Image: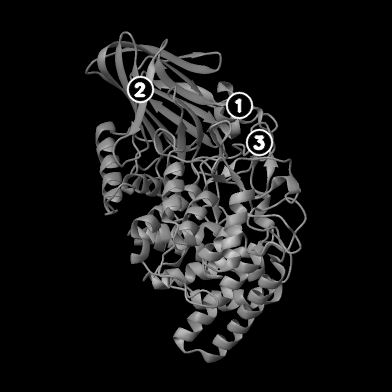
Amino acid sequence: MIGDMRTAALVCRDGSIDWLCWPRFDSASCFAALLGAPEHGRWLIAPKGNAKMRRAYRDTTMILETTFSTKEGKVCVVDFMPTGADHSSIVRLVIGREGAVRMRTDLVVRFDYGISIPWVARVDEKTLSMVAGPHMLTLRTPAPLKGEDMHTTGEFTIRAGETVPFVMSYSRSHLPLPLPLSVEPSLAATEAFWREWSGRCKLTGPAAEIIRRSLVTLKALSYRATGGIVAAVTTSLPEQIGGARNWDYRYCWLRDATFTLLAFLNAGYTDEATAWQNWLMRAIAGSPDQFQTLYGVGGERRLDEWQLPWLPGYEQSAPVRVGNAAAVQNQLDIYGELADVMTQSRKGGLPAAPRRKEIRAVFLDHLAEIWRRPDEGIWEIRGAPQHFTHSKAMAWVAFDRAWRGAQERGEKRAHRKWKKIADEIHADVCRNGVDRERGCFVQAYGSRHLDASLLLLAIVGFLPPKDPRIRKTVREIERRLMADGFVLRYETGSGVDGLPVGEGAFLACSFWLVDNYILQGRRTDATRLFNKLIKLTNDVGLLAEEYDPRAKRMLGNFPQAFSHVALVNSALNLMHGARIRRSMTSRGKKSPRKHVARNKS
């Protein structure tokens, strides 16, 4: 991934940019070969013929360097998106390292998710414009280019010491062409920006590098104008190859709120934590019965889901979806996330978000009325709503944080009111959410199935991590939801989600198991699983949503913020261990003096 905190592009190993939405993360794509073929849009720059490839980010930046080695020589393609430019742009620098390498470029622009072919016009000998409807791309390069079968192609030879730049910028088609970008100053400024930003992370130790890469990835997934953080750059990368578990993740989920906030806070990034908190409060402004689980990067609420029949999908995994119908689902756990993020923001010393107190009071009153209802749950099932145990436990989190905060502020009436409801929900979950025969929590009331979201019960302080019910739940998850040592979300064969059976292991859930091991004092198990998980990153340190242990490949949208947030928090828990205290007291007796990043002191 390369990005400028407005949007991001995915660069393949062969030197082709196969995915890019402009001008925002959730805009229609102009390169969609990732979900189809080159004819759906891509931009290739690579040697002609066979070449060996090696790539890496330049230190702790989002500048990607891909080195191709051929029989004739060696060439490096440097890809980046300037962070401070007036227009969103992609810069591709072809730099000769050794010998003389014959290069080729193939540019296929297809706006509107691979369907709209632009008019391409030559402005001067170094400039092309590509226009379709409201969109315009401007390409500037000294390389010779020509039009051929609705492609823009070119060949050139790069010799050691030479550099051939390509600069593509996005703008609205009714506006003048953007001014030329000064390449070397832009590269220097972009490198300085990322080095300064990543340099604020002062962590040291064996996991520091991968923590820093995950934090940089999260920063690149943030929309700088608002502070919103998208779940992923992509839509419809399948959770099951050839299946229909394909969703649009280019939006901001409330569910990620507390985990993301604490990842930034614990790593020392208070500005990013504040921006995320403020985005959250703006997004939910309004009536509490209209709260959504996800929003657009600007806080937009209309995320209507529809399908793109002209795109065959990644490895024929159809349908390709735009928008996400989960935005209108009832998901009770988001209220707990909202309460927890308010608590952690206050404890982390962040400035109070506007109307935070009023928002808390209004949504708690609403939650008091609806917490007994079934919902679609954390996994946004497309089947019938159920009384999910995790959802009820997160409703408890909302009232637990509320009464504790009221107690600290000396608000006796609110303290009694919210504590009474918290106690009622807690008793309800312990009565209905536990399998009496096995002594473990289950996915939903009356069910015998397991769910990895139950790993969060100890993390949020619902019960002490060494409570027999928690221990037995972890043991049952190890027995029934593990695939080659990684954690599945739930038992898809139960039919609970209304979708075909099968998907990969969910990486965030696997990190939650690491956190549970830490809380239970199983440090060796925690370290072993964490090290196994971080080996799943690709060659530049990025993680998708899921992993297929049998096929040994990633699945789901990419790169996945939730996976990287979970990685950061688990790594910090392993690094700091008992030195960081939990801020919440678990139900019944005090928790061990262990830390899980969710409950930062």
Mark before the other along the chain sequence, 3 or 2: 2
Secondary structure at numbered mark 1: loop
Distance in Å between CA atoms under marks 3 and 2: 34 Å
Q: Quadrant of the N terminus?
A: top left
Amino acid at circle 1:
Gly
Distance in Å between CA atoms under marks 1 and 2: 27 Å
> What is the x, y in percent for residue 462?
56, 70
Q: Residues within 10 Å of mark 3 (few under 14, many from 20)?
A: many
Q: Decide: marks 1, 2 in contact (CB < 8 A)?
A: no
Residue 266 as seen in the image, left or right of residue 407? left
Q: Which residue is mark 1?
A: 36
Is residue 326 depicted above or below 140 in this figure? Answer: below
Between circles 1 and 2, the one closer to the viewer is: 1
Is residue 172 depicted above or below 338 in this figure? Answer: above
Secondary structure at numbered mark 2: loop
Residue 440: give its label. Answer: none
Q: Is residue 287 visible?
A: no
Q: Which residue is mark 3?
A: 320
Q: Residues within 10 Å of mark 2 (few under 14, many from 20)?
A: some
Q: Which residue is mark 2?
A: 141
Residue 522 as seen in the image, left or right of residue 316? left
Between 390 and 113, the one lying in front of the other is: 390
Residue drawn at (62%, 37%) of the image: 238
Between 181 and 204, the one lying in front of the other is: 204
Q: Quadrant of residue 360?
A: bottom right
> What is the x, y in percent for residue 320?
65, 36
